[in-house]
Image (tube, rainbow, N blue to C red):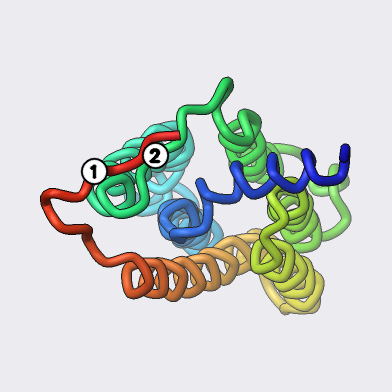
Amino acid sequence: MTNNINQIQKQTYRYYYEDGLVELAVGGLFVIIGLNTLFISIAPAGTPLATAAWILLPIFTIGGILGVQYFVKTFKESLVYPRTGFITYDKNPSPTRWLVIGTALLLTIVIFIAPYSFLNRESVAGGTILFIILVSIGAQVNLRRLIVIGVVALVLGISLAFLPGSEHAGLSLTYFGAGLVLLSTGAVALRKYLAENPLPDANTPVTNG
């Protein structure tokens, strides 16, 4: 009985992620953060590009979290809810999701600021952070593709540890690569969702949970 309840709870929360919109939004944010940190790693210190990249890093990090939430909310209201309805949760699904995503991006800044001895290899640290985030969410809602993406991020981070040159470049490419994977899986999931759930007839009522 308890197992059945747990499965129902997971299925209910998985509904929030099945359309791929969260992956698209978070993947886009990771790509932006990855490109920005790459500019930091390759731009000569003191140049306008380097200064701009440093200024934009916290803006993208903090503003990006708000942007992700706005993106998901807006497109769910226009694409998802008219097709399969919405669920009113007693509490927001996976309430720590924005916290763990924000923590990952905050740790990106910490890695850049902290002394080199703080971490052995930055890309490994970044890949591990993404692995923990994606696997924890995927396991919580029983969505296997998030677990697979988490493993890919970890493998990518470890692989880029052997990249010659700037440590920051390896970390940047880890986030950029993971972002591209998230964008790809999100696009596939959204396309599948839209194909399987056409808009109902105007006279068909939408069920709310």
Q: Residue at x 46, y 60 (%)?
A: 20
Numbered mark located on residue 86 in the image: 2
Residue type, numbered disc 1: Pro
Q: Position of residue 178 (x, y in %)?
A: 59, 66
Q: Which three-letter amino acid code belongs to the residue tagged 2?
A: Phe
Classed neighbour count for the residue bearing mark 1: other residues with Cα under 10 Å, few (<14), some (14–19), many (≥20): few
Which residue lies at the image location 77% right of the left edge and 69% below the top edge?
151
Mark 2 or 1: the one toward you? 1
- Residue ID at (31%, 45%): 81
Q: Which mark is residue 95?
A: none
Residue at the extreme top: 90
- Residue 59 visible within the image: no
Label 1: which secondary element = loop
Q: Which residue is mark 1?
A: 205
Q: Residue at x 44, y 75 (%)?
A: 188
Relative vertical location of residue 89 with respect to residue 41 in this rendering, above or below: above
Tell me which label, 2 or 1, sits earlier in the chain: 2
User: Of 168 and 200, which appears nearest the observer?
Assistant: 200
Across and down, in percent, residue 55 comes to 40, 37
Residue 175 vs residue 9: left or right?
Answer: left
Hey, which residue is sitting farthest left in the picture?
Answer: 202
Per the image, label 2 sits on a secondary structure element best described as loop
Q: Report the front residue among 189 and 25.
A: 189
Residue 24 location (% of width, % of height) = 42, 59
Give the quarter of the figure containing the N terminus: top right
Seen from the viewer's position, the closer of residues 156 and 90 is 90
